[in-house]
Amino acid sequence: MSSSKVPIGYLTRVEKFSACHRLHSPHLTDEENKITYGKCNNFHGHGHNYTVEVTLKGPISKERGMVLNINDLKVYMVDAIMVPMDHKNLDKDVPYFADVVSTSENVAIFIWNNLKKIMKEPELLYEVKLYETDKNIVLYRGE
């Protein structure tokens, strides 16, 4: 490795939050919603214990030895994820989901957009990985 080349690192932090929602699209009939979303279309909704991994990609600073201070990433994640969504009804308590179906894909996009708005170096954001369950996982990279 040449001394002029700055190494690139990937920094990931994990948070867990609980939220409820109902998968229901105003663009579909009630019957189409039942067929599309199954038990997740239950009128009273259902809940999840989500796990989210946020990964940053960037140069590892020679002076500080890190991509970003992990404590800064923690603060960003609390503000972008925990405050708006933890122990909330996504469809009723989070304005973004008033007209967006609260699928895992859309929750990941919501997290991405929130992080981009508050990060001092938003270009470092590489990936949001959302576990709705141990078996249902969404990756979003802003594409």
Image (tube, helix red, strand yellow):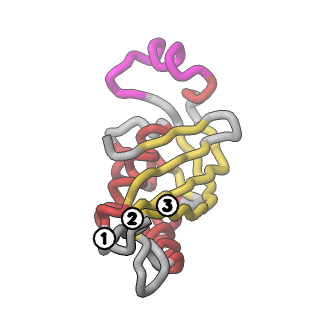
Relative height, residue 63 to residue 44 (above, below): below
CA gap, disc 3 and disc 1: 14 Å
- Determine whether the residue tagged by mark 2 lies in a helix, strand or loop: strand
Q: Secondary structure at mark 3?
A: strand
Q: Residue at x 64, y 45 (%)?
A: 48
Q: Which residue is label 3 attached to?
A: 10
Residue 121 circle label: 1
Nearest to the eye among marks 3 and 1: give it: 3
Do the residues bearing badges 2 and 1 touch, measured as CB atoms within 8 Å? yes
Q: Quadrant of the N terminus?
A: bottom left
Residue 105 coordinates in the image, percent (x, y): 45, 38
Q: Tell me the crowding category of disc 3: few under 14, some 14 to 19, or many 20 or more residues within 10 angstroms, Cα based.
A: some
Where in the figure is residue 13, as x and y percent of width and height? 57, 64
In the rendered structure, does residue 45 fall within the stretch colored magenta? no
Q: Amino acid at mark 2?
A: Gly
- Earlier in the chain: of badge 2 and badge 1, it is 2
For the point 56% across and 55% down, the residue is 53
> Is residue 127 placed above or below 134 in the rendered structure?
below
Q: Mark 3 to mark 2: distance in Å?
A: 7 Å
Which residue does the numbered mark 2 point to in the structure image?
A: 58
| Magenta span | 25-38
